[in-house]
Amino acid sequence: MIGARVGNWYVEAEIGRGALGPVYRARAFDDPARTAAVKVFTEVRDPAAVQRLSAELLPLQRLEHVNIVKALDSGAHGGLAFVAWELADGTDCAKLLESGRRPWAEVLGVAVQAARALKHAHNRNVLHRDLKPAHFVLAPDGTLKVLAFGLAKVFAPPHTHAPAIGSAAYLPPELASGKPFTRRGDLYALGGVLYTLVTGRPPFAANSVVELMHKQCYTLPERPALLVPDLPPELDEFVCALLDKNPARRPGSAAVVIEELERLRGKLERKGETIAWPAKVTPDTAEQPALPALLGGASEATDPAPPPRPLMKRPLVVVPLFLLAVGALVLAFAWPRMSADELYAAAQPLLASENPDDWDAAFEKYLDPLARKYPDQYKGEVARAREFVRDRRELRRALAEGAKPETRTPAERAYLRGLRLVRDGETDAARAAWEELVREHAPDDGARRWVELARTALRLLPPK
């Protein structure tokens, strides 16, 4: 296809290839100075999907954000659908991961930019549905571009075929129960991408989509901090919160994620970390017309009003501020400073508590200041306290989400039997087990969860 014309675009070179087809660098026929990335969906054979592409792409073309690759054009070429996107300058995160995990400070920058992109799209009722490292492109200056917004909805795979494991690794667990995809599903996928970037591996590994689906629903991922010893515990908690299996316990929106990241950034900077935070790009208002021009009226030629006196030159403001500053300096020198022994002793009752909020307070009020002010004292004790709290959190989380009663219902046993058969390569026997489960237990409301999982598994099995 190199050198051919696809819609309004001349194809110059192949720059990538995904599960649905190749991506080309191309130039516009009507303006050779314009370049684009043109994806041709060679693996999409559904004529209905090709026909509805233009209608589905309209909401995507309204996305205007510095962290979102803009959709420029779409159509059909030789019976195949294509989409032209803004050509993003940089390297996608899947390729960056080939050289190992990314520094956690860099991942924080990716997280806030991705959350800003999701907030912009979600506010316009556009879900991504397929977040993964390959759809995150990092420019040399650190700017993130998110690719392929909304395409997973347009080109959803047929129910008789399983999605690629690379995409399924980041799908939220509620999809396995037949629930609709929501904004919190995008936030779960974001958590999976951040986990992969910071640890160098996805939250779950599996040999089949069915096994991966089971792990997404019932297995807790290994905490990132256990794989990356220098990972700040605040970032570890943040990623685990996004990966919560219960959508109601995840952050409620991308705006909440941004607020949490800002809080996390402030906490790390108070500990002495240097965080390179991406600037928030807002529309330029420097050249906006004056208010009379906006209202369509002319301004009258009158004497200008005298400018107001600067705030910091008003005695009623300056004098109280001066007295406040002097008082703060006196207080800082006069206030007794806690010794290392006192700080460590004050943290012990909080660490012994069963309330996780007390554990946070122990570090924020006492152990973190101890590590900053007395770096050579109690170093091992603080590290062991951090491990102790991390283990306690993991235990509480496992007991809350992962513990299962020993007694299983017949429907659950039938579902798990099919799963074991899939792992042993006996897909026909697994299909028979799940079909029997659906037939026998479909009318039983108490078995609905396992019936839905069995139906989903049957759709994901390869055809006979």
Image (cartoon, rainbow, N blue to C red):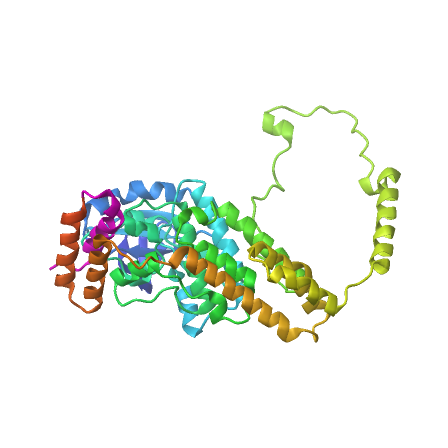
Q: Quadrant of residue 464?
A: bottom left
Along the line of sight, the residue nearer the viewer: 56 or 423? 423
Along the line of sight, the residue nearer the viewer: 130 or 449? 449
In the figure, 166 relative to 114: above or below? below
**Count of number-bearing discs:** 0
Q: Is residue 150 left or right of 337 when viewed as pictured? A: left
Magenta stretch contains residue 240: no
Q: Main secondary structure of the magenta part?
A: helix
Q: Residue 383: x percent and y percent?
A: 60, 71
Q: Residue at x 73, y 69 (%)?
A: 341
Q: Residue 348: x percent and y percent?
A: 65, 64
In the figure, 228 relative to 109: above or below? below
Along the line of sight, the residue nearer the viewer: 456 or 25? 456
Report whether residue 205 is seen. Answer: yes
Q: Residue 256: x percent and y percent?
A: 52, 47
Residue segment shown in magenta: 443-464
The quadrant the N terminus occupies is bottom left
Q: Residue 431: x percent and y percent?
A: 15, 58
Q: Residue at x 15, y 66 (%)?
A: 426
Which residue is farthest left?
Answer: 464
